[in-house]
Image: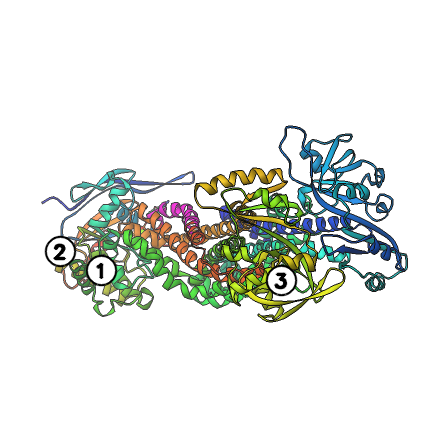
Amino acid sequence: MPPILEARDLTKRYQLGGEVVEALRGVSLTVDEGEFVAIMGPSGSGKSTLLQLLGGLDRPTSGEVVLEGETVSKLSDEQATRLRRDRTGFVFQSFNLIPLLDVTENVALPFTIAGQDPRNSDLAARVRDAIEVVDLSGKQHHRPDQLSAGEQQRVAIARALVTRPALLFADEPTGNLDYTTGSEILDALWRSCTERRQTIVLVTHDSKAAAYADRVCFVRDGRVLEEIPLGRRADHSATPLISRLAQLGL
Amino acid sequence: MRSLSSFAWRSLRARRVRSLLTVIGIGLGVGILFAAQATNASIDRSVDRTVKQLVGRADLRVSAFQETGLSDTTLAAIRGTPGVAIAAPQIERRAYLQPPLGTPPKPPVTVLAIDPGVDPQIHDIAGAAALTAAGADALVSQRLAADDGLEVGSQLVIQAAGEPVTLIVRGMVPDNGPVLGGFGRTVVVGLDIARRAFGQIGLTRIDLAVSPGANPGAVAQELERRISGEHYVLSTPADLGVSLRASTADFQATTALISAIALFVGAFLIFNTLSMTVAERFREVGLLRAAGTSRRQIHQIVLTQALILGLLGSAVGLAIGAGLALVMAGYVRSIATIPIDVPATPPEGILLSLLVGVLVTVAAALEPAWRAGRISPVEALRARPEAGSAVRARLRWLVLVFAVVAAAGLLLWPNRAGDPGPLRALAVYGVLLLVTVLSPFLLRPLGRIAGLPFALVLRAEERLARGAITRDPSRTALTVGALTIGLAMIVAVGGVAQNARHAATAWLGDVIPGDEILTSITPVPLDDQSPVTSDLLVPGVMRLTPIATFGVAYQGIRLDAAAVVGGDMLADGRLRFVEGDRTSALNGLDSGGTVLLPRSLADRLALGPGSMMRFSAIGAKSADLRVSGIVERGLPGASGESLIVGWSDATSLFGVAGADFFAARFAPGEAGQAGRIVLESRARELALEPASLERVEGAVSDALGQVFGLFDALAVIAVIVAGLGIVNTLTMNVFERVREIGVLRAIGMTRRQVWRMVVVEAGVLGIVGAILGCLTGLVAGVLMLGLVAAGGLAIPLELPWLTMALAAVFGVAVAMLAAFEPARLASRISIVRAVQFE
Ligand SMILES: Nc1ncnc2c1ncn2[C@@H]1O[C@H](COP(=O)(O)OP(=O)(O)OP(=O)(O)O)[C@@H](O)[C@H]1O
Ligand SMILES: [Mg+2]
């Protein structure tokens, strides 16, 4: 079976005044369906940039991204937007929710944007289902300012899941959270992966978070330095990852 | 301190477009203010000049009450009164000039006859010395000379009741000449010439100067004792000024009100701009505070910004205002009865406008400055400002600005003692403030209604847009408030205009018993053999009825009166009776001894059917007439509605010499059409000016339309200022939502959807503003109707549907147009940058 996502030799250069910043210098990567991949690396290594290219939020300077057989990096803005709406989900570090909409409305947003009526029974069921996966069934009508930071982030995950996307991208979703709250988020991602075969690409600089993944790509200075297969483990222990990284001198 | 003010300047420069819009907004507000003030000043100056020209050095004026004029006996009595130094008699009459052979007749002229020996001692009429009492010489006004192509040495022939008199033009008097009205077509001649042209007639007035040291008041008392045998009116130059001013008072009051409102709307703009700057620079201000900048210094930064905006805006405003003043003066010139000067720009007017502009700006800046000062360094570095808590503070601010603008308005108000204008204007103003203060609370429910039409087609955009509007209710409310106020003014002005116009035209149809009016410049005697009536009763004319308008004295005041044929009114079905029996009252008029009162007059004098009224009659006698009925409306008189008497009383008691106009009713169908043509040509032969009732109504309606058109234009400017405010607010909303919009784009919102979202946001604002504006405008309109009705016109209420619809469409269109640039900004937001966490 072909990989669901394939990146070939991606480079990204930013023009900063007169200076050129090379955020990515030739990254290739594949993700299989149902896989949970973590992209790990120090600050400024290019993780977010890579994720943005993979998810079609931005275009690479060179190289290409193929998602479900479609070359994302060649799409027009309009087409890329459609693709994001229908085939991918995003979770960012913060400011994920629309403050004036309640939980249900926020989760249903992708449908609303697509011009569908989220009150339609089929879609409403999917919204309820997504809220259930992230364990927020009791708080459907709360507004974001009435939720804790962890709960807000779970709403964002539910919104990313509600369209049953081919891929879910998450950029440091636990970056703003304490350890326990962070675990809730990671548990929710893990559940969606194991229970619903959701493919996930997670960006993090935290090895404890990366340890939830089946495989970790270690990025530094705009290159994939190492791919570390961890396999699917229910205990999420970070020990194997940490010892492997230590072996590599990272 | 230098560095701090440069900080203020830099932060304005960083938001060039917004600062520019704000400056333009203030400029428009100050511009209207300045223009209104300059125009009003030039009206005042023109009135003073006209009074001076008309009255000259006279201390008192004795005017004839009746058409027949004052007798030479009275002139002699005045000259013999101790304390009277000079008495200059004048006659003023309308007449036609004989047109050159083969040319159509021109409009009538006003003939002013003076006593060349005495008159120059009181009035300054250029060239009057060249006249002699009996010489065939004349002076003409420049206006008449230009109209008719006359020059010094030209010949003209006056045609009136007496013999035709041929005169030679000996000189020109400036502009319209020393008379009021009459389109400035003036001929000045000697008294004897007038008596030849018009037959033996009395004097129109006698202007007199008291001897040095004599007290005009005492002289007036002595005159009242001595003049007997005929009725007269004694007045002072000040009285004339007051009555001339009264005719422009409504205009001045309304422009003052509208300019205050435009300024108020401009203040909203300042307030919003500075609030945005403060919110944007929240963190920066926090850092400044952390680095040891004092609260007072922060205040200074914000106030300096306000000062810069205010000064620039006011300067722009002066330029705009100077142009606008020219336009306004043009309008006034077309409606005023006196020649209006080109508006000059008095230095104190310039200073005052600058001062008011800056004052309002600074008042508007106080609250944002205070808010900036309260930003704590700790809080600024941690979070964003909490919007909702500012609502009360902002409302307090609004009341403050209201007070400042109101005070400025009262300061600039055309000052006339004891008129209800300022109070009513304050009431209008207060209603607008009230709506603005209430609008944060109305925003959510109204927004829901306003969103409905958009929700039908653009569900997601509508939902998100509506959310954005309630994000900072007080800011949105202020933005909508400005729009509401502008639209309310349009609706109010439109409503007043429509009602006034309707009332005026309905009034004529109600009381004039004919389709055509034939006006004569001199009274047409109504003896049985009168050629006029028999000549005009051509086939196709069903009825021809004479009407005269004149003044009567009742308990020492002048009332307008009209003489009619009761039987004709009855047959034609005119006059609506409120009280009294129609048939007997109208027939009673013709036999004499009774009078009909219009309702407004009956109310004012507290009279009803059966009351007796004692009038002054000719020959220094008095006459008692019984009120036999009250009618809805009387005939139009010189200064309002007139009471109605029969012809027999009019001639025998009040000395009415003849009909001022005839009303002709045509037979239905073709016979009537043919009759009209014959009638009109016969009328012209008899020196009567025919005009269809529709044309008269149209003229009234046009005159009103012109005045209100100007007010509308001013209100439209206020809406445009509000539109600038919308640009600022939407830009701010977009700016605050960069991340949110980034997320929306990331999860699949297209650029076009983002664009539409912002435009829908503006559309919802526009609709809310339109709803509130229409409702407020109706209330303000009712209050303003009171303002106009003070002029003696009772006006029935009628909803200005068309104006409301136009105002609503205009408001929504302005709002949505204002959204284009912010929407473009929003749709260009880069997702990558938006979602980058700082
Ligand atoms: N819009 C941009 N313009 C210029 N340079 C950029 C831009 N975005 C990222 N960079 C640069 O590219 C490099 C990679 O940035 P990126 O955000 O991908 O790193 P990261 O691994 O996500 O870091 P962090 O863990 O801090 O989020 C950095 O040096 C950054 O400064
Ligand atoms: Mg990053």
Q: Nearer the viewer, mark 2 or mark 3?
A: 3
C-alpha gap between disc 2 and disc 1: 15 Å
Q: Which chain letter matches label 1?
A: A
Q: Does the image show residue A224?
A: no
Please give the residue where the numbered disc 1 appears in the rendered image: A158
Q: How crowded is mark 1: few (under 14 residues within 10 Å), some or many (20 or more)?
A: many
Out of B662 and B79, give the one closest to the viewer. B662
Which secondary structure is most common in the magenta stretch?
Answer: helix
* Chain letter for mark 3: B
Q: Is residue B487 visible?
A: yes
Horizontal placement of B493 versus A162: left or right?
right
Total marks placed: 3
Q: In this orientation, which residue lies closer to the viewer: A21 or A86?
A: A86
Q: Name the residue under label 2.
A: A197
Q: Does the magenta stretch include residue B814?
A: yes
Q: Earlier in the sequence, mark 2 or mark 1?
A: 1
In which quarter of the view is residue B196 placed? top right
On the same chain, marks 2 and 3? The answer is no
Q: Considering the numbered disc 3 on the image, is that residue within a helix, a strand or a loop?
A: loop
Give the magenta part as a residue range. Answer: B810-833
Left or right of B157? Residue B642 is left
Q: Nearer the viewer, mark 1 or mark 3?
A: 3
Residue B592 marker: 3
For marks 2 and 1, give the one nearer the viewer: 1
